[in-house]
Image (cartoon, coloured by chain):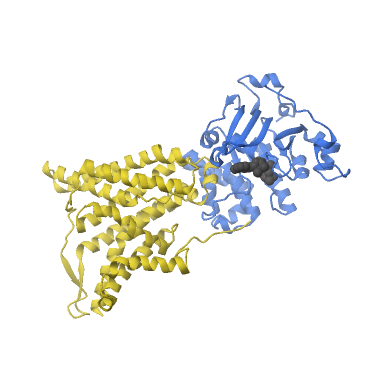
Chain colours: A yellow, B blue
Amino acid sequence: MGFFLEVLIGGLLAGVLYSLVALGFVLIFKASGVFNFAQGAMVLTAGLALVRALDVFEQWHWPFGLALLSAFAFAAVIMAIIAWMVERLVLRKLVNQEDIILFMATIGITFFLEGLAQTLFGADVYPLNVGLPKDPIFLLESLFDGGILVNELDIWAAVAAGLLVAGLALFFQRTRIGRALRAVADDHAAAQSVGIPLNQIWFIVWLVAGLVALVAGAVWGSKLGVQFSLSLLALKALPVLILGGFTSVPGAIIGGLIIGAGEKLAEVFLGPSMGGGIEIWFAYVVALLFLLFRPQGLFGERIIERV
Amino acid sequence: MGAESRLPLQPGEAEGVASANVLDVANIEVIYNHVILVLKGVSLSVPEGAIVALLGANGAGKSTTLKAISNLLLAERGEVTKGKIHCRGERVDGLTPNDLVRRGVIQVMEGRHCFGHLTVEENLLTGAFIHGRRRQQIADDLEKVYHYFPRLKVRRASQAGYTSGGEQQMTAIGRALMSRPNTILLDEPSMGLAPQLVEEIFEIVKNLNEREKVSFLLAEQNTNVALRYAHRGYILESGRVVLDGDAADLRENEDVKEFYLGIGGEGRRSFRDVKHYRRRKRWL
Ligand SMILES: Nc1ncnc2c1ncn2[C@@H]1O[C@H](COP(=O)(O)OP(=O)(O)OP(=O)(O)O)[C@@H](O)[C@H]1O
Ligand SMILES: [Mg+2]
């Protein structure tokens, strides 16, 4: 039992990261109907900007706290510039084109970002230390023999992700811009008709997705080092989206947790009897089953129809 | 508002900067998708403080005309290819919908288009988007909207997607009011509503027109109701204005009676078979 919980918790914590990437997708998809293939590349870019800026500031012997804050600010500015360029140079030109054309455009953005980020910031594996402890800790030692082993970093990652999601929820529910974003997600044309400028909304939503990518990049980076494989996270987010539904923020979060926990549990408990390696394809098989039996996902859009 | 000021200006006067018309549409042509010609030279004007009805059958081009003015056309790959649109003497074709809302011209779209997942009150608040953070003003305006639509106050916390058709129409009009418009382009408010509710909505339109001095350009298929509340009317057929005049005159017009009010005459199909109304080519 203790071991099961240990695997489960480890999986859920890994799932938090899938959730973060999927969340970036959902935000952009809801607000602009664009399937943003570049979300993974944005995680890579944000992570690289963060780690390289932090290295530089530390070389300048800035105090760690200041260096860390400045590095986050630098990366956030980079994400804002990307959001601005995407809106100006891509979305604005392609407005009202078919969805598939916009999707292709985001594939273009992916390659562009991957190339640009690695040219500007380098293409190695950069270990990232944002000051979070990495020690393994034991929980509930009184209940289970030997307790449950978890990585402290994972817990901090989950806390960071939780705070981010809570912050986003507040932003969407309580602010004027958040309300406008939800309005655009519901009905583009009507939002335009009341004077909400879509260009501005698209910029904001790409910026928010960029900041989500920054958090994801920081967390993954501190776990595994910032490296090119972050860009491939986008591929893991796909099954999460199919599971959670493309338009549902809670769906992205819960879908990520389910996939994360599911693949770890499957690996540990089914792996031995099936020759292992389940973790790699588990998510995609789950996604396939969902496509067959529940294509709208767990939290697929409740379509309100009333004439 | 005196009755005189509602008379439209004569052709020559519209060129001046200080027009008494809130809207002057001169001979516009609209093409969708670069190929489909839908409006073939439509001219109309909305005098300050007037309710002007734009009438015609399905597909006549009423909605297209309104969207050409508010420039929601752009989002549907439509384009004004000829003609001019002036708002209070200022050329406005080519501006964005946001620019027009800032100038006080706002469209309430056909089919209401409420934000289904937002509450009624949130829907209303989105209408104040251009007013940013002026909290006091927005709170006052909200109260005013609830004053005109008491039913919305009761339903303020309901998700708009689950309210009735009439409540959605009220929400859509209320939302537009929150932008503090001087002109509302109202597209088929009667669509799918019971006669009594249609009457209620039009009464409110009349109230808003008289008390808040809002001018209306009103697209309607319900000719009967529209001509009772409007001051002037234009009749569109296949993208052309075939007849226009004071609402009272239009109500008495034999052809209007026959084709749009369903009274008298039989057998003839279209205006064209009856009489050839030469389009008055104004402001060319
Ligand atoms: N986005 C579009 N693309 C192509 N054609 C369009 C588009 N929108 C409208 N049309 C065409 O333009 C013509 C006029 O349409 P419009 O919606 O303006 O008519 P309407 O008078 O408002 O009719 P209704 O009373 O049915 O609302 C129709 O023939 C319609 O098929
Ligand atoms: Mg119409």
Residue B158 image position (x, y, % from top left) = 55, 58
Instruction: Locate ligand 1 by image quadrant.
Output: top right
The part of the image, by quadrant, that contains residue A115 is top left
Residue visible at 62% across and 34% down in the picture: B30
Q: Percent position (x, y) of residue B113?
A: 58, 49
Q: Look at the image and tell me in which quarter the N terminus of chain A lies.
A: bottom left
Q: In this rendering, would A223 be left or right of A96?
A: left
Q: Is residue B108 visible?
A: no
Residue depicted at 27% across the width and 42% down the height:
A116
Q: Residue B94 lies in what quarter of the image?
A: top right
Q: Is residue A158 above or below residue B249?
A: below
A37 or B98: nearer the viewer: A37
> Among all residues in the image, which is located at the extreme right?
B265
Front residue of A131 and B94: B94
Residue B231 % position (x, y): 74, 35
Q: Nearer the viewer, residue A108 or B75?
A: A108
Q: Quadrant of residue B109?
A: top right
Question: Hey, which residue is sitting farthest front in the picture?
Answer: A275
Q: Is residue B39 left or right of residue A279?
A: right
Q: Is residue A260 left or right of residue B270?
A: left
Q: How many marks?
A: 0
Quadrant of the snapshot with the C terminus of chain A: bottom right
Residue B127 shows in the view = yes
The residue closer to the viewer here, A159 or A129, is: A129
Residue A251: x, y in percent? 41, 62
Against B265, residue A24 (above or below) is: below
